[in-house]
Image: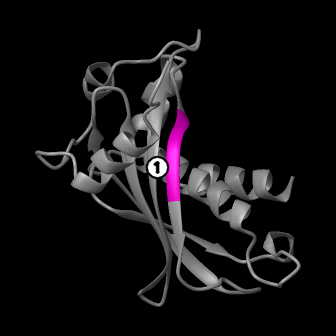
Amino acid sequence: MLMTLRWLVRLIGTRHGNAAIGKPYTTTFRVMPSDLDILMHMNNGRYLSVLDAGRTSYLVKTGLWRQLRARTWHPVVAAQTIVYRRSLTFGTKYDVRTTFVGFDTKNGYFDQAFVVDGREYASAVVAIRYLDGSGASVPPSEVLALNGDWALPEVLPEWATALSDAVRPTSA
């Protein structure tokens, strides 16, 4: 419940705009008691929930959120991987740096990092699939046709392609 409230505060508190899609943006959080596990550091599952809030904030800042919702489209996580380098502990203020880096034939890819005083504590690669109101995939070309200041790299980074290859089913 608390994470949902924090997520809504980030969504409401984020300025709607037309920030460049493909540039990094940060969302600030603080480790709360409800984020902690028995070892008194942020629970590994909480990182994933915070990443959701960071991506939503990103979509709002770039102006994509309203356009997606107007079409009853929504992003869902298709795959993700995260690397933990340092522990986030109670009271620590941290930023989640989020960058949308492009599409392959099905998914969009986000590069996200938990940053404290310029140091990365964790980093994640997240593959997102956009779905329409009936649950069907929205082709990347239709997402790219939305109004926005698109500033994506010419080529999808190799690490995004590697994630896609790694999670592709080997058999039907």
Taking depth in this image into account, of 116 and 84 the one nearest to the observer is 84
Q: Which residues are magenta?
A: 76-81
Outermost residue, bottom direction?
117
What residue sits right under mark 1 in the picture? 126
Q: Is residue 62 visible?
A: no
Q: What x and y, as percent, mark residue 33?
A: 85, 77
In the rendered structure, the answer to whether residue 159 lies left or right of residue 27 reads: left
Q: Residue at x 32, y 45 (%)?
A: 18
Q: Residue type at mark 1?
A: Val
Q: Is residue 103 visible?
A: yes
Outermost residue, top direction?
134
In the rendered structure, the answer to whether residue 151 lies left or right of residue 146 reads: left
Taking depth in this image into account, of 14 and 116 the one nearest to the observer is 116
In the rendered image, the vertical position of residue 66 relative to residue 35, given as above or below: above
Q: What x and y, as percent, mark residue 103?
A: 28, 36
Neighbour tally class for label 1: few under 14, some 14-19, many 20 plus, Cα within 10 Å: many
